Image: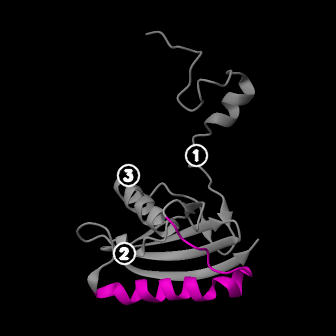
């Protein structure tokens, strides 16, 4: 049985293997994820591919301000209404500029990332950081996972101006 010593599963093929790289590549311990103050851990290993597709679709729709396209439980529509009202009405108070004009090509958020999910029987709580040119908005999503994923609640946790 021959081993290919020029490759290692823990190291990108683009990196030249040398002792220092191998020492840091695999310690045999669980990975350590960074933690952002007031946001939480960035360990997204608990997010399945299906959940990530759902979250990406949600964030793309929010970024484009297509709130009608959000997959919200019918019993939780009030949460969407409050989220939309709070974002539009408190934008200038928190960022010092008016809420952006939306057209077909514009987005109010440029990017986003997820935090570590808290997974219960039929509910997932997950932090999301939305990033725009004016600052950040941190959300906590409550997701019903009993059948297909549906938003059960949206809570704005924090605003931070750039």
- CB atoms at circles 2 and 3 under 8 Å apart? no
Q: Is residue 53 found inside the magenta-colored segment of the image?
A: no
Residue 43 image point, x, y percent = 55, 58
Residue 159 image point, x, y percent = 66, 79
- The image shows residue 69, relative to residue 98, as above or below, that is above
Q: Classify 10 Å Cα crowding around label 3: few (below 14), some (14-19), many (20 and above).
A: few
Could you tell me which secondary element the residue under label 3 belongs to? Answer: helix
Please state which of residues 151 and 26 is positioned toward the viewer in this rendering.
Answer: 151
Would you say 98 lies left or right of 152 here? right
Please state which of residues 76 and 68 is positioned toward the viewer in this rendering.
Answer: 68
Q: Mark 1 points at which residue?
A: 29
Badge number at residue 9:
none
Please state which of residues 120 and 52 is positioned toward the viewer in this rendering.
Answer: 52
Could you tell me which secondary element the residue under label 2 belongs to? Answer: helix
Q: Mark 2 points at which residue?
A: 68
Give me the C-alpha separation between circle 1 and circle 2: 44 Å
Q: What stretch is highlighted in magenta?
A: 75-103
Residue name at image x 56 percent, y 25 percent: 8
Closer to the observer: label 1 or label 2?
2
In primary-sequence order, the first of circles 1 and 2 is 1
Would you say 123 lies left or right of 110 here? left
Where, by quadrant of the figure, is residue 69 drawn?
bottom left
Residue name at image x 41 percent, y 83 percent: 80
Badge number at residue 49:
3
Quadrant (top left/top right/bottom left/bottom right) for the N terminus: top left
The rendered magenta stretch, by its main secondary structure, is classed as helix
Where, by quadrant of the figure, is residue 162 drawn?
bottom right
- The image shows residue 50, relative to residue 22, as above or below, that is below
Where, by quadrant of the figure, is residue 149 drawn?
bottom left
Residue farthest toward the top in the current orientation of the protein: 2
Residue 16 image point, x, y percent = 68, 21
């Amino acid at each position: 049985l021959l081993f290919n010593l020029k490759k290692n599963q823990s190291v990108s093929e683009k990196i030249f293997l040398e002792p220092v790289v191998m020492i840091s590549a695999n310690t045999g311990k669980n990975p350590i994820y960074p933690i952002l103050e007031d946001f939480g851990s960035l360990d997204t290993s608990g997010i399945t591919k299906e959940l990530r597709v759902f979250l990406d679709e949600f964030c793309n729709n929010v970024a484009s301000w297509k709130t009608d396209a959000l997959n919200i439980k019918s019993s939780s529509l009030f949460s969407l209404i409050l989220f939309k009202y709070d974002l539009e009405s408190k934008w200038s108070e928190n960022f010092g500029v008016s809420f952006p004009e939306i057209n077909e090509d514009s987005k109010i958020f440029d990017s986003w990332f997820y935090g570590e999910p808290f997974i219960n029987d039929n509910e997932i709580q997950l932090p999301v950081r939305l990033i725009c040119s004016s600052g950040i908005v941190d959300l906590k999503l409550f997701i019903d996972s009993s059948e297909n994923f549906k938003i059960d609640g949206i809570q704005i946790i924090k605003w931070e101006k750039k």
